[in-house]
Image (spheres, rainbow, N blue to C red):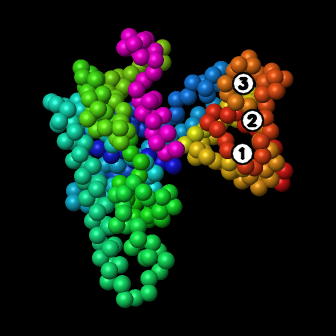
Amino acid sequence: MEIGILGLPQSGKSTLFEIMTGVRSREMHGETCVRGLASVPDARFDRLVQIFKPVKVSPAKVPFSDVNAVGEKAWDAVRQSLSGAEGLLHVVDAFTAASIAEIMSRYRKLEDELILADLMIVENRLERLAKMAKKPMTPQDVFHAHVLPRLRELSLSDEERHGLRSFSFWTIRPELVVVNTGEENLSVADDFVREAGPSVPAIGICCAIEAELMALPSEERKEFLDALGVQEAAFGRVIRAAFSLLGRISYFTVGEDEVKAWVIPAGTKAPKAAAVIHNDFERGFIKAEIIGYEEFIACGGTNAAAKAAGKLRLEGKEYVVRDGEMINFRFNV
């Protein structure tokens, strides 16, 4: 799981990366690609930490990558560095723009470059396939000949998308647009959302304010947010949106030793969810002991009370894990 951050020069993409991960990529001279982890803000996780007061806390994490490449081979370097990225954050400079039309132009400029880069690869591959028309094709060749002409269609199945991963196409990856606004024009992000339409997931953030916020001690940070009339920093919403963009959820394991959020794809069945802890948990899976977070809190925040109230469930191999559940796995190997 990885999300690549893209943007035109001076869009604020490296600033956003630093705010979310704490890694100062701009100071790493000579590094084309810098990676960092961002903790996913989750009020449920914070509440469980308060209740169990564990020795160790392990929130859900999202890996982000920031790429700095220039010159004729810039796109090749970016594509190679982000070949494993499952999703993209497209940062758009709205803080120096004079109008929404200019912001949309900047957004479309990078989008067009991404599309063009993909089309060039498609055309090159189709040309090679055409030259092979009189030769026996491999199953992969046949697959490419069938699917590549439909790259920009919305009808590609998950299996087809997976089969095209070796090309590192930009345009079949989920994308979240981050509109980097000025301090005096925060509402321009709403204008972008209306102009771009519902098919373009977008979120607004002022990186200048967020950078100031992150430089403050935690208590002063809270006062800063209160003065702005908001409950949390905007970069937290960006991280959560990126987490959801990849179709990920988390479940919790809790105790006095550690409270941990385990990240899994939505729709994962219990044995596969157990495997992220250890492969033995899947191999010897017996049952999953599950308490819903809301039910746990409603029972006073204790396992004993939740069990006494009949809120603990035993689920088998076909159970699909839900976001925010507290789970203990029974297994035997």
Cα gap from disc 2 to disc 1, whole angstroms: 11 Å
The residue that label 1 is drawn on is 319
Question: Residue 237 at x, y = what percent?
Answer: 44, 30
Q: Is residue 238 magenta?
A: yes
Residue 281 visible to the viewer: no
Disc 2 + disc 1, Cβ < 8 Å: yes
Q: Quadrant of the C terminus?
A: bottom right
Give residue 92's position: percent from left, percent from top: 27, 38
Q: Main secondary structure of the magenta part?
A: helix
- Magenta-drawn stretch contains 186: no
Q: Amino acid at mark 2?
A: Ile
- From the image, tell me which residue sits under label 3: 296
Q: Amino acid at mark 1?
A: Tyr
Residue hosting label 2: 290
Magenta part of the chain: 222-247
Q: Reply above or below: 313 against 122.
A: above
The residue located at (72%, 45%) in the rendering is 319
- For the point 44% across and 52% down, which residue is it? 85
